[in-house]
Image (cartoon, rainbow, N blue to C red):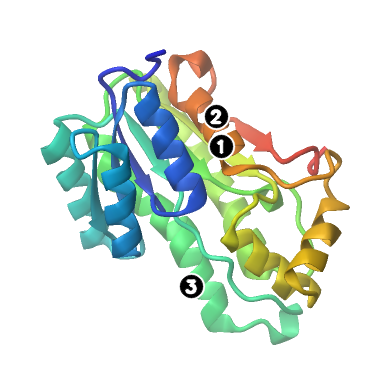
Amino acid sequence: MSRLAGKAAIITGGEGSIGMATARAFVAEGANVFLAGIAEADLKAGAAGLGPDRAAWKVTDVTDSAQVKAAVEAALARFGRLDIVIANAGVAGATGPIAAYPEHDFDQTLAVHVRGAFLLAKHAVPHLSAGASVIITSSVVGLTAAPHIAGYATAKHAQVGLMRTLAAELAPRGIRVNTIHPGPVENEFQHRVEEAATGADRGAAAAIFDGMIPLGRHADPGEIARAMLFLASDDSSFMTGATLAVDGGMSS
């Protein structure tokens, strides 16, 4: 199949499990992929695994405007175009009641998720043409919420507001903008969140979260990647301003 033949994508948080699964899905469908993230060794290995002719990478702090601009320019220089923009970088943030919630962690969580998505859009949008797709990785808690995650839940809700603004602004240009809302995913990021949230060990914490998911299990990163592929391709050509839940029923 070649749903993305000839297209080029940039993915922030590209070295993470969802970012890499998405990159693999895109390359399999004919796209070239530029990975931006903060873990140099993982970015380098990930791009090598995708193929040097199909992928490139750059260490990028998404909270730094100059670095995000440089990543976008590097992607354009490498592939000559940009058709798919995925703001996927994220941090878990702190957990705790609002009165004790660390202010620095609150600010940093919003900076990575919200400022990071804003900066990627700001620098990438001028280079997009009709048919392009912008995807922001939010979360099930961008549609719901839970106690003790003020930074993360606020950031994930704010991404929806940013998405809706961009969708309205870019629709006249034929550019689509949507958010994707994964539930718990089987990866290291999620395990750390669960352990912090429950105070239990890894296995017990995962079991507690499985009990919250109507489908009774965590998602595989590839399942999220397939939803990303849907939003990136013409399969979703009449979708913009949408919140796509891929959460095993948690937000229903």
Residue marked by disc 3: 108
Give coordinates of residue 77: x percent, y percent.
11, 39
Q: Is residue 148 visible?
A: no
Residue type marked 2: Arg
Residue 167 is left or right of residue 39, and the answer is right
Residue type marked 3: Gln
Quadrant (top left/top right/bottom left/bottom right) for the N terminus = top left
> In whole angstroms, how far apart are the C-alphas of marks 1 and 3?
28 Å
> In whole angstroms, how far apart are the C-alphas of marks 3 and 2?
29 Å
Residue closest to the eye, 117 or 245: 245
Residue in the picture at 65% in, 49% down: 185
Residue closest to the eye, 131 or 203: 203
* Within-10-Å neighbours for mark 3: few <14, some 14–19, many 20+: some
Give coordinates of residue 25: x percent, y percent.
44, 31
Q: Of circles 1 and 2, which is in front?
A: 1
Residue 147 is left or right of residue 95, and the answer is right
Residue marked by disc 1: 222
Q: Is residue 219 visible?
A: yes
Residues marked 1 and 2 touching at CB (< 8 Å): yes
Q: Residue furthest left?
A: 77
Residue 176 is left or right of residue 33, and the answer is right
Q: Secondary structure at mark 1?
A: helix
Compared to 131, does 197 lie above or below? below
Residue closest to the eye, 195 or 242: 195
